[in-house]
Amino acid sequence: MTEESTIAPCSLIWPYFDNPDMLRHQVEVWNRYSSSLAAHLQFIVVDDCSTEPAEPIFRELRHKNKVLLRVMERLPWNQHQARNIGASVAQPMKGVENPWLYLSDIDIVLTAEAAFTMLSKPLDRSYHYTVERTFAPDFSARKVHPNTFLCSKAAFWQINGYDLELIGGYGGGYGGDGEFARQLSGICPRRHLDDVVTIGYGRRERNGEPAVIADADTRSLDRDEWQKKYRAAFDRKRRIGDMRSRRPIRAQFERVL
């Protein structure tokens, strides 16, 4: 991997909730980023009011441009608000007004090689980009992960981020993913980078086998109740013909690092 190419300034944003083993692995991976690559990046973790805080682990990140935010109240299915919070403070380099945002889940790893391949491309802000994901430990199947993508900060906020009224729908309870992707594609169509491969670790079980690194456990939340709320909110918004996200940040949060 050479680093003579121009690397696009980018904020890398991950929500975190009660998954210290995965965060520890992420920090180990990020610490392997070269200083010349990391100079163009901002590492943002949003701790979603975890009982096992991210701070002691995230402090081990050696790169200077790092931000740790913590949501101050425990809210169910709050990953998308955490993403909105991270996107609100994104500023990887001084003077860069419309940086790229890379958003993903804490159990999906972006290696230094993948980050360099992605950000050294001739990226066009009139598009957003998706990437491949393969699964540890066998690294066999590859597919697109809908919540892992690259877009400009201006595009993210043109649709006002994730819609918090749509929390609790399909996809494990978080909801709103599909509507966010639809609106984002409406202003900057999707392009796929099939040579950028991330690594997924955190599935609790796959084919009856334990995950390599266990994901945070959200089984105590009532998915049926939240899916009913999601469907009611979605139907109401569609009925009045206004699907726009409003008040994308509603929780109090603080900067820890």
Image: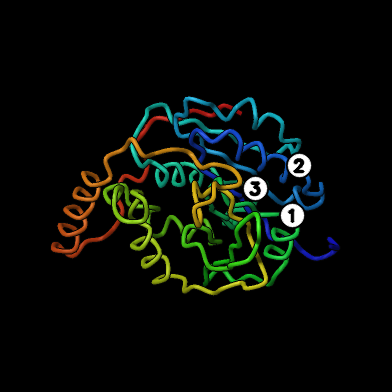
Inter-mark Cα distance, 1 to 3: 17 Å
Along the line of sight, the residue nearer the viewer: 227 or 96: 227
Left or right, 132 with reference to 118: left
Image location (x, y in percent) of residue 146: 46, 62
151 or 181, nearer to the observer: 181
Please name the residue shown 60% across and 27% down the image: 55
Would residue 78 appear left or right of 115 to someone viewing this image? left
Residue at 62%, 73% in the rendered image: 194
Above or below: residue 192 compared with residue 252: below
The amino acid on which the numbered mark 3 sits, given as a three-letter code, is: Pro
In the picture of the structure, the residue carrying the numbered disc 3 is 92
Relative to 242, is 182 on the left or the right? right
Q: Position of residue 29 (x, y in %)?
A: 72, 46
* Real-space CA distance between mark 1 and mark 2, rounded to the nearest whole angstrom: 9 Å
In the rendered image, the quadrant that contains the C terminus is top right
- Characterize the local packing of mark 3: few (<14), some (14-19) or many (20 or more) Cα atoms within 10 angstroms: many
Residue drawn 38% across and 52% down? Answer: 162
Q: Is residue 46 visible?
A: yes
On screen, residue 52 above or below 175: above
Residue at x-position 82% and y-position 51%: 36
Q: Which residue is mark 1?
A: 112
Q: How far apart are the two marked residues, 3 and 2, measured between alpha carbons?
A: 17 Å
| Render colour scheme | rainbow
**Please, what is the three-letter code of the amino acid marked with disc 2?**
Asn
Dot placed on the residue nearer the N-terminal end, 1 or 2: 2
Where residue 31 is drawn, which disc sits there?
A: 2
**Viewport quadrant of the N terminus:** bottom right
Q: Nearer the viewer, mark 3 or mark 2?
A: 2
User: Residue 125 is drawn in which quadrant?
Assistant: bottom right
Element marked by disc 3: loop
